[in-house]
Image (spheres, helix red, strand yellow):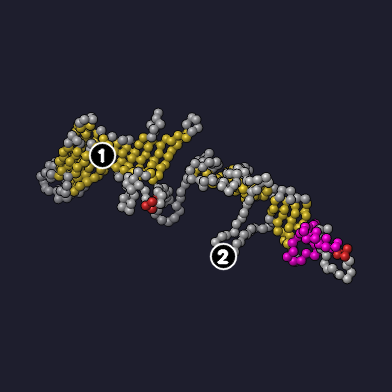
Amino acid sequence: MAQDIFNTIDPNTTSGTQLATLLVSFKDALISNSSGAARPSEIAPQGTWVQIVDANTWQLYMFDGTDDILLLTVNPTLNTVKFPDSADTFGLTRQSADSIGPILEMVKKRDTGATQVGDELGSIEFKGFDGSVEYTQARIKTISLDITSATEQGAYTIFETTSEDSTALTEAMRIAGNGSIGIGNVATPEKKLHVRSTTALAGGKFVRDQDVAGGAEVLIKKKRGVTDNGQTKLGDSLGKYSFYGTDETGAEALLAEIETVTEEDTSTTNHGASLVIRTKVAGGTALQEAIKIDSGNVTILGQEQNDQKQSIALQDDTLTRNLFSIDGTIYKSFKATIQAWGLDTIGPDDYAQAITINGVYNGTTWYFTNDDSDLAGNGLLMELSYTNAATLVVDYVNQIASGDFDSGNIYLDLVRNK
């Protein structure tokens, strides 16, 4: 019997044949870990033994002198090992002089060769219990992407959960072999983060729950390689929001985008950048600029509004603007509104003169019209001139009869059309 352990051997009364029988029984008990229906009486404290409950249940116990402590249960048919239900902690400790911590290792081996594409390398299952049956409610598993070799060891990891009031495990997140993350059953993430949903949950929400003035932030950063500490250069795209639809073939179609581009090499003193909104017109497939913001100037559908409230002191200088071309762009028309504000006889909250100028270019010549209003009723503060090259010059002349304007400003609102 596998549990037959002798207490003592009396050499004076034990024959060689008897000794051999005792040693064989001892060997059987030793190599079977004293397996049987109950703990052998000869097991001392700290000793272990195996209870054979049935053909599919082997339980390993340690005797503490009073009680048998269940260590684990083995199912020899399924080749599974289960820790006791009462155990709430499974610990791994590595005590060493190096920086390496404990390692929980899972290895998949095939009987006939290397691990294959699609093989599960390991799985962690989280189960609940309804009183009679255990159910897997969540799972983490890793799948091989390659036939494992010294040069090919790709793998991805899947996180599966079960929705409330459901019984089906569903993929919630995947970490692809290249490190990209797919949320919502995304088999092949196309970006570092790829989110998919069949409900309104397809989105992001950022909340900053803190008693400070600042809010939540979405940070988009462009950094080049190691040269010049990664300095961004003129023309670099700092980031882009792209909006896609789906065509009748099921293919993605880019419909609109918002992009920010550097207007100069970024430095400690130069941070110039522009923001562009592009859309596609009905019946077309090409992206077109709808709105561009550049150095404080706004271009709307080919119309550039700039020099908004650009001002000079009344007596300091002239205000000169080229209306024909800027940075190589040829404009077809413009509208300029010039106002002079005085701080003497008129008062700080009233303007004394307003001039509106319209210019149209026919490809050869500019044609101008203007409306000059003396709002003070007693003379002019400024006069203007413009040339066929569409250069506008505004001069301070101070022809107010009732007194000099010792201080004030000339303001220019200007809109150009491409």
At 77% across and 50% down in the image, what residue appears? 55
- Is 25 magenta? The answer is yes
Disc 2 + disc 1, Cβ < 8 Å = no
The answer for how far apart the CA atoms under marks 2 and 1 are is 69 Å
At 15% across and 44% down in the image, what residue appears? 396
> Does residue 383 appear left or right of residue 251 in this picture?
left
At 14% across and 50% down in the image, what residue appears? 406
Identity of the residue furthest to the bottom in this view: 12
Pick the residue in front: 352 or 125.
125
| Place of residue 234 in the rendered image (x, y in percent of width and height, measured from the top left) | 34, 45
Image quadrant occupied by the N terminus: bottom right
State the extent of the magenta-drawn residues as a range: 20-49
User: Which residue is under mark 1?
Assistant: 326
Crowding near pointer 2: few (<14 within 10 Å), some, many (20+)? few
Pick the residue in front: 296 or 349.
296
Is label 2 in a helix, a strand or a loop? loop
> Does residue 11 appear left or right of residue 337 in this picture?
right
